[in-house]
Amino acid sequence: MSHLKSKIHEALANKQLQQNYYKATNSAVAKNRIRSQEPERWQTLRELAFQIRKNTIDNLAFYLEKAEAALNKNQIKTHWAASASDANEICFQLLQKKGIKRVVKAKSMLTEELELNEYLQQRGIVAIETDLGEFIIQEAGEKPSHITAPAIHKSAADIARLFEDKFGLPYTEDEHILTEFARQKLRDDFLQAEAGISGANFLVAEDGAICLVENEGNIRLSVSAPPLHIALIGIEKVVPHHRSLAVLLELLAPSATGQDFPGYFSMIRNAEPNREIHVIFVDNGRSELWQNHDFRALLHCIRCGACMNNCPVYQHVGGHSYGWTYPGPIGALLTPLMRKAPGDELLPFMSTLCGACTDACPVKIPLHHLLLKMRHQSQSPQTKPRLFSFAMKVFSKTMGHPNFYSFISRIAHLFLKLIPGQNIHLPGLNKYRHFPKPAKKTFRDMI
Amino acid sequence: MTKTIHLFVPCLVEQFYPQTAAATQKILQYLGYQVFIPPKQTCCGQPAYNSGYTPESTELAEKWLQRFSDAEIIVAPSGSCISMVRNHYGQLSLAPKYRALFEKIAPISYELTEFIGKFHGESKFPGRFDATVTYHASCHLHREIAVGDIPIQLLKTKEGVRYLPMRDADRCCGFGGTFVLKFAELSSAMTHFKAEAIIESEAEYVCGADAGCLYTIQSTLQKMKKPVKTIHIAEILASGLPR
């Protein structure tokens, strides 16, 4: 059994886990008011968003240069990181120069991708996650299972047990008490932190505004309370101007959580006196992806999580089964292209191609068609085992020759008649299904 | 002059549900068409295409196009096979001759309920089907062909049918072609989820418009020893239909 299949097996054995995913993702999908109640506006916005993202990504160098010039004009220092280790090292150097030992972190999937926390920790710097979900999984020693709701796999009971073990909080599933406890605990961290590290949802090229979307206010506090703010920004996060930003913002929260608008939206333009802001532009495989015309559209992604919220496979197997930072349909595409670990090439095959992701994507990335394209490009013995490839050859040859097909079909029917019962017994599959036998007569034989 | 429809019989229908093809033929004849069944037709190539086998699917696509080359209209009782022809053949590197055929044929290929909805929207099919029926919305029919609620409207107009809604009706049944074999355990969990929604609807029949979904669902309901029966929408509409 492959590593992926054993992870699937493990996830499917945990009914509670599937319930957690199903409940949380479905409630987000159901709340998306524009999609369900204003379908025409929804489609217009999506088309606009697609055009904006396509234009931006196709002219990425132009907009990045513009963004950098605007940031510098705003007294924000800029850095460029080609790889994860470059990005982590730049960040570490900035902290070390000031002798900083404690930082607070705003939720950022990019820093998860870079494994920044681990990098800093190994060098004696403590990074504290301040988003409630990230805080929970950091305390639990786990990885995010969703890109906008990192602790989506945890039930209230799981969190109650965790807080009881870790902090001695009397067991309670009351989410207000749990949240208030984390809030009080983090309050001191905010006050003591010497730097705040964030990602960014968007970076506006025309005036260098760093845009941060959130629901808890922790991001706002992380980047404004400490005297130093370091923002790590994937190079694809740039948007040309505020009017294009407005379109993307209208789609982001409805697609992510089903809210009309996020709880907090911050735009940071200038560093206040005695405060410093640094932006680290991170490539880490993005320009390679940019050069790949078949999959460049993946850079259009605005990381809303709608594709996983709508994905029946994701709901069953959960975020951790995908094995890297980005789960769901977008992860099944990004992981083999960016991480490229052995076994990642199987991910595009872990889909029924139902298209629920494509239908939900606010920037119209044709996700399930890209999964298909990747299947066609894949040539590994893992994705195309020799026996299966041989069977496919036999299938296509048989189907390609109608007379031979009729002949084979007749033989198969005669053979199946000899087997008692109503079902075909396929080795290893009988525990899952009872496949019905073919009809007594094929349509061809009926007419 | 009577128009002729080329009936495209998907391989799963041919092998497992010949009654679906017969019902489709009956419906089209009732609507006043001549029905021609290209004798040498086989598979559209979707199983190979969805598994990522380019040369195999290209070969089958070209052969399929050849067999339907002189069609005026093509109808199939399957959304996914029609979607393969309409939305995916164009992605293959077809020889110029077949590329031209594809461009001619793709716009005249229809899924059965789509065809009825588009050209015979006001039709009511006489005859009865006395049962409670719920409807599973197949992914490709609903997302790639975008048939909307035509199938449900058709069900509701059939005398005797008591339509019962299903929760998560447009959620995938877990079939996905060779996915059912490659990720058997995951696929089975997905079908169980669908089966539970079907059972909750309390209908006697689960109706669909794609043999792949129906086969998958049937295999699971049988395993679960549940009495709910699967049926293709063509069979319900053709029930009691005069010749």
Image (cartoon, coloured by chain):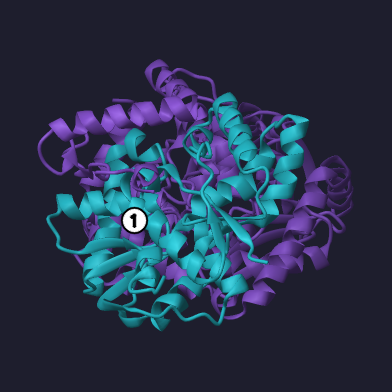
Q: As rendered, which of A26 and A137 lies closer to the eye?
A: A26
Q: Residue A79: percent from the left, percent from the top?
A: 76, 37
Q: Quadrant of residue B12?
A: top left
Q: Residue at x 27, y 40 (%)?
A: B185
**What is the residue that sits farthest to the front in this orientation?**
B1
Residue tagged by mark 1?
B19
**The N terminus of chain A sits in image quarter:** top left
Left or right: where does residue B32 sit relative to residue A23?
A: right
Tally of numbered tags = 1
Q: Residue at x 61, y 71 (%)?
A: B118
Q: Residue A226: percent from the left, percent from the top?
A: 61, 55
Judge whether residue A392 can be spotted in this image. Answer: yes
Q: Residue at x 64, y 54 (%)?
A: A302
Q: As rendered, which of B62 and B73 lies closer to the eye?
A: B73
Judge whether residue A361 can be spotted in this image. Answer: no
A152 to B32, vertically: above or below: above
Name the kind of residue labelled 1 in the image.
Answer: Gln
Q: As rendered, which of B197 and A171 lies closer to the eye?
A: B197
Instruction: State the SS at label 1.
Output: helix
Left or right: where does residue B12 sit relative to residue B2?
A: left
B142 to A446, vertically: above or below: below
Any idea which chain is the cyan one in this picture? B
A141 to A413, vertically: above or below: below
Q: Chain of mark 1?
A: B
Any idea which chain is the purple one in this picture? A
